[in-house]
Image (spheres, rainbow, N blue to C red):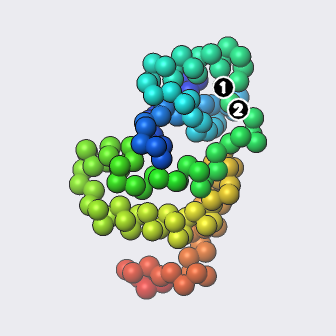
């Protein structure tokens, strides 16, 4: 048995850390993320429980965040993800820069306009298989 929703914090462009949540649909598939616009986990949990009572925990599909919206600011040095990773292991500035360039130049152009819940394993495989067509080679194998 799983919870109806899971939460995480993410820094937004203003620098504030806002709580987002994922929810599980009737098929058990994880959907989201959506913002609660709350700054504390307690406040966000109460917000999600109010949505459950209204039957609105999973918003209308037209409002689903795109990959581009989710990725915006993800690889910034002050993002919640980078800060968390740096607290657990060494994350160099160079690694962050390279990851941001990969996201901006390779991943976002392919997935950017797609709603997060619409990105499938097949989409990821199609993107990965497309590297040879884009002139990108594996450094280890040359292919």
**One can see residue 93 in this view:** yes
The one nearer the camera, 1 or 68, is 68
Task: Residue at 62%, 31% (x, y): give it.
Answer: 24
Residue 7 visible in the current orientation: no
126 relative to 114, above or below: below
Q: Which residue is mark 2?
A: 59
Considering only vertical position in the picture, is 84 above or below 68? above
Q: CA distance from mark 1 to mark 2?
A: 6 Å
Circle number at residue 138: none
Of 13 and 68, which appears nearest the observer? 13
**Front residue (pair 15, 130):** 15
Residue 53 occupies which quadrant of the picture?
top right
| Image spot of residue 114 (x, y percent) | 68, 55
Q: Position of residue 126 (x, y in %)?
A: 64, 67
The circle on residue 57 is 1
Q: Secondary structure at mark 1?
A: loop
Is 97 on the left or on the right of 42, as rendered? Answer: left
Q: Is residue 21 above or below residue 82?
A: above
x%, y% of residue 128? 56, 69
- In the rendered image, the quadrant that contains the N terminus is top right
Q: Residue at x 35, y 61 (%)?
A: 96
The x, y position of residue 92, in whole percent, is 26, 61
Image-based side of 29 in relation to 14, left or right: right
């Amino acid at each position: 048995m799983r919870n109806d929703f899971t939460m995480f914090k993410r820094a937004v462009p203003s620098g504030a850390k806002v709580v987002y949540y994922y929810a599980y649909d009737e098929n058990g598939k994880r959907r989201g993320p959506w913002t609660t616009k709350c700054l504390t986990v307690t406040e966000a949990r109460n917000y999600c429980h109010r949505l459950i009572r209204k039957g609105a925990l999973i918003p209308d599909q037209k409002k689903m965040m795109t990959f581009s919206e989710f990725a915006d600011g993800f690889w910034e040095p002050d993002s919640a993800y980078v800060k968390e990773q740096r607290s657990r292991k060494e994350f160099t500035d160079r690694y962050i820069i390279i990851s941001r360039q990969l996201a901006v130049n390779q991943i976002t152009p392919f997935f950017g306009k797609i709603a997060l819940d619409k990105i499938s394993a097949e989409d990821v495989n199609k993107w990965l298989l497309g590297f040879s067509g884009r002139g990108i080679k594996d450094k280890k194998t040359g292919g």
